Amino acid sequence: MVTLALLLTANAGADRLIDTDLERKYAAIFGEGPLPQGVVLGSSKALYAVRPKDLEPLGDYYNFAVAGADPAYLAWWWSLYRAHHPAPEVVLLGVDWAHVSVYPPRGRAPDSEFWPWPMFAAALREPEANVRKLLLNRFPLVKDRLVLRDALFGKRRLGSSDMAGFDRGWVPIDDRNPNLVQKPWRRITVIDDRVRELEDLIGRIHRDGARLVVFQTPEYRPLSRYHPEANKVIARVASGVGAPFLDYNGDRASALNENPAHYRDWQHMTAAGAAAFGPVFRRDLAAALSAPRNTGAGGRRPDTTPDRRPAAW
């Protein structure tokens, strides 16, 4: 018992030392603060590229993008948000071309550190739960030992987020060591199961009545592995519910895609890149939101009440 008490105390101390954007995003979901007018969902590309302060003329937004998030994870995240809050007026969904191809599933277990105990206990009881993975990710003393080491010695790992710049979910990427290296371009294959996961995510948001705008952040064109065939699929899925697709690697590519100072690597924007992208995105978003709302192939009755169905842990 003494050993267990010491471990729990050390774990609590480690938790206080480590601050991450994901921890704050869970706090925003479970907290009682004012709700944003709009939310941003997506993976690390949207996380680093979309600053809420650049969207302020259009309303109050919170960036809930999560590094490594795939559509199946985002669908779960959306159900978790809806279990606690009404649907926001607007959802900005960042979709990568890799999301409809070979994109490794993130899974939910890495987030178990931030779940309330009842939610964690419910996950452990699921028949398909990976108990070992859930337990290892529950405790920052184990999960975040390298981050903890750096925090104790006042260091920050290369490529990590700079929490000093955190703003409503957005966080700048560490750009001390840019990695603008050419990598081989390979043709990808669109995978039907991945497309269905994207359709499920977009369908959920659409049925809940939020105004949806799908977008893809700029990539560094000289090194980009852009795949137009994948983006055609994304555009088709978005149009099925009447949502526009703002593709900043296709028809909306510009000088933003050419400046190496805008990128940490071929796909992730630096703080300077996000600052340059912000006014462009705001302008295009304003135009998209001012256009008549298209409900797509099938109409639906908007539902802005909280979704109290149990979220799929």
Image (spheres, rainbow, N blue to C red):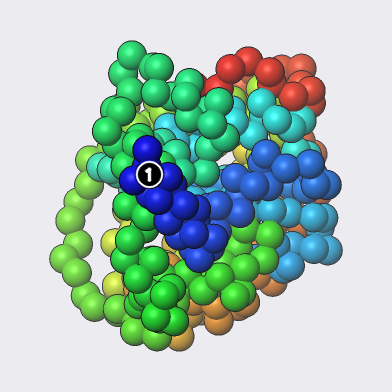
Q: Is residue 26 left or right of residue 8?
A: right
Residue 5 image point, x, y percent: 42, 45
Q: Is residue 92 visible?
A: no
Residue under the image location 19 percent in, 62 percent down: 185
Is residue 87 placed above or below 65 in the rendered structure? above
Residue 228 image point, x, y percent: 36, 51
Is residue 116 placed above or below 179 in the rendered structure? above
Q: Which residue is mark 1?
A: 2
Residue type pointed to by label 1: Val
Residue 37 image point, x, y percent: 80, 46
Number of on-image labels:
1
Residue under the image location 33 percent in, 23 percent down: 129
Name the foreground residue: 229 vs 34: 34
Q: Is residue 48 left or right of residue 142?
A: right
Res. 29 image quadrant: top right
Residue under the image location 60 percent in, 63 percent down: 170
Is residue 297 placed above or below 258 in the rendered structure? above
Q: Is residue 19 visible?
A: yes
The N terminus lies in which quarter of the figure?
Answer: top left
Instruction: Classify mark 1: residues with Cα within 10 Å, few (<14), some (14-19) or many (20+).
Output: few
Residue under the image location 74 percent in, 62 percent down: 55
Q: Classify mark 1: helix, strand or loop.
A: helix
Residue 74 image point, x, y percent: 50, 37
Is residue 153 placed above or below 202 in the rendered structure? below
